Image (tube, rainbow, N blue to C red):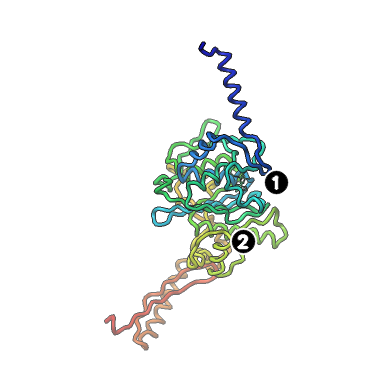
Amino acid sequence: MPKPGRDEGDLLGFVRRFADRSTFTVEEELGHGYVRLRVTEAERRQALQDIRCVEDVVKELVRNARDAGAREIYVSFQKERGRWRNVTVLDDGVGIPEPLHRKIFEARVTSKVDGVVEDAFGVHGRGMALFSIKQVAEEVRLIDSVEGRGTIIYTRLDTHKIPEKKDQSTFPRLERDEEGTVSVGGGPRNVPRVLAEYALGCKDVRIFLGSNAEILATLYHRSQELRKNWAAGTGDGAKPLWFDLGGAREGRALHLLAWERLGLNVSERNAFRILEYEIPPLLSVNEVLSEEGRDGPPRRSDLHRQARTVWVDHLARRLDQEDMEMISSSLGDLLRCIGERHLLLVEPPVIRRRKNRIIISLALHDKEESD
Ligand SMILES: Nc1ncnc2c1ncn2[C@@H]1O[C@H](COP(=O)(O)OP(=O)(O)O)[C@@H](O)[C@H]1O
Ligand SMILES: [Mg+2]
């Protein structure tokens, strides 16, 4: 057989390109703008391999949120007993119509009908990511999705089967070129890096990363802001799925809302700590990355420095250290007197400031036992 000449090679390439495109034709119309694509077995296998690690899972879930036009994306990233990784991604994007809630986890189901989408992370839009995640995850579940209000997807991964980078605390180094454009430089290929790439790539989308409790704290305060706007008649857009959180007045109510509405498992105790500002809201990844003048790359802990404005309306903040010492010393004198009468030893008071109150804790001991 003669060796293929230049023209024949080109022709082959042309046929292949043509064949590839033909594999993306629609097999089934599912309504609401969704279709099931026809696709070759080879492509199916290729897409399955795309999910190799926890970072890939986060990348695909956040990518879907971004494609859905979300303005805010919350990634709850929590390890359990050193082995299981629980990931919940919450967004305020377009949402998924009810009849498609189960179908999105099937192979080749997509709303990205206009063809394959390519971004900095490569090709997608084949309707394979959620299906592939389902193959490798212990569990993947649509917690809720409402058209116009957003989507929440939860997944649980066994890191013995699907690994993750050990270091999940360091953000990548950022590099600035001559024109001042910032890009992601060296650093571990971890989840903070995936999110940094999105945050730099789409500046108008705010991305948050934290534990269940930290994400809940952030959503709680965000909801309070939104509710204030709505009450003042300046609320715009649809209400996101976390809109009701800010109405919670006690720990148990917040704990239940978090679990039942958002699929976030946060203890009653931690929910209480959120209400008391002991667990403050997170800064966004975008905010931390845009801070100047830091030595070395940012770290996860930098997300914890809550914006100062948040504290302004807290009455207890008006008491300073000196006031606290005055309270402590007068109380101490009084309690020594009272303690004498009841054979009680009273430890020096522990005073904490919480929102609009101060909490005083007094440990008591039996005087005779401790003599
Ligand atoms: N967070 C989300 N918000 C809105 N729609 C989503 C979200 N996640 C997934 N979907 C829908 O599910 C479909 C399937 O998702 P996926 O398996 O990642 O495939 P692809 O993104 O390639 O279409 C998407 O096309 C989209 O319509
Ligand atoms: Mg996708």
Q: Does residue 182 appear to the left or right of 82 in the view shown?
A: right
Residue 62 x %, y %: 55, 46
Closer to the camera in the image, 222 or 83: 83
Closer to the camera in the image, 256 or 361: 256
- Separation of residues labelled 2 and 1 (CA atoms): 36 Å
Residue 128 x %, y %: 56, 41
Query: Considering only vertical position in the picture, is 198 above or below 347?
Result: above
Residue 263 x %, y %: 54, 59
For badge 2, the amino acid type reads: Gln
- First in residue order: circle 2 vs circle 1: 1
Q: Is residue 159 visible?
A: yes
Q: Circle 1 is placed at which residue position? A: 31
Q: Does residue 242 appear to the left or right of 282 in the view shown?
A: right
Query: Considering only vertical position in the picture, is 279 above or below 285?
Result: below
| Point 44% across, 71% down: residue | 351
- Determine which of the numbered discs, if any, sits on residue 143 in the image: none
Element class at badge 1 = strand
| Point 51% across, 43% down: residue | 196
Q: Is residue 288 visible?
A: no
Number of marks present in the image shown: 2
Label 2, ligand 1: CB separation under 8 Å: no
Q: Circle 2 is placed at which residue position? A: 224
